Amino acid sequence: MSTDIAISRESAILTIKLDRQSKKNAVTRAMYSAMATALREAASDDSTKVVVFKGDRDFSSGNDLVDFLEVPPSDHDAPVFQFMMALSECPLPVVAAVDGFAVGIGSTLLPHCDFIYASDRAQFMMPFINLNLRPEFGSTQLLPQLAGYPMAAEMLLLGEKFDAATALQARLITAIVAPEELDAKVAEVAHKLAGKLRPALIETKQLLRRQAEPMAERIKVEGAAFMATLSTDETKAAFNKILHR
């Protein structure tokens, strides 16, 4: 297991913690693989009823650009897509605790969670367009459904930072809590869920998550568009600008 992902268990609750604060929890290929494995194991473990996602101070600043550019994803077997599929198909309730930065995949993973609690200092951003990339993780389907087209367009076409109040208005998060109360709130909800019967949790979530278009197909369509832009001169220039500023 990657040392940058901390996996812990309390009774029926599995916690996946991004533990790379020196890089504001920027995600590497090894971290994606570790999280995908943990999610799949939780799904197949009858003793697990709830998954919790959290970061160490920051939730995640998105992809680690150095690691990302070293081996860009070129097919749907890449670790990032394995993680996307594992989370989007996770049959168990997923509770997220968001503090600090939630950038890129740190934001786009949230609609795949079932309860999302954010501190009032959380900052969100989906800057794909600024890098000449295409949105990912089903965000072009889920954000218009959650927030409505106008807000989704602001988030994905402008690629600007927004605060927790805006995230709540967009229904990207469940509620805003004070930073010092975030862990307690997430623990409270996770323990309530852990007190339910596992089959009831799984079947109720499955019914809630039914979509007209299978999420796996949307992730693949977005992923193909995303990967097609990686080798363009414009994208390389955008990455170089960030890496050398």
Image (spheres, rainbow, N blue to C red):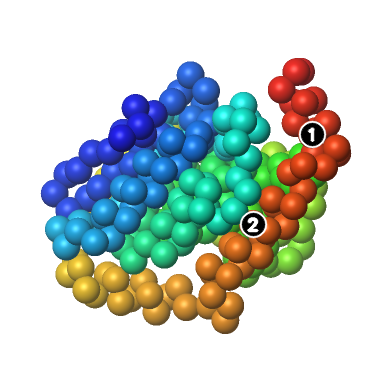
Q: Is residue 172 visible?
A: no
Percent x, y for residue 220? 60, 63
Residue highlighted by disc 2: 223
User: Three-letter amino acid code at disc 1?
Assistant: Lys
Tell me residue 208's x, y (percent): 42, 75
Q: Residue at x 66, y 65 (%)?
A: 221
Per the image, the residue denoted by label 1 is: 236
Which SS class for mark 1? helix
**Residue at position x 20%, y 43% in the image:** 9
**Disc 1: CA contacts within 10 A as few (<14), some (14-19) or many (>=20):** some
The quadrant where residue 32 appears: top left
Q: Badge 2: how crowded within 10 Å, few (<14), some, or many (20+)?
A: many
Q: In the picture provided, is 60 more to the left or to the right than 156?
A: left
Residue found at x 47% / y 78%: 210
Q: Quadrant of the N terminus?
A: top left
Most extreme residue toward the right is 234
Residue 8 in the image: above or below residue 204 = above
Q: Secondary structure under badge 2?
A: helix
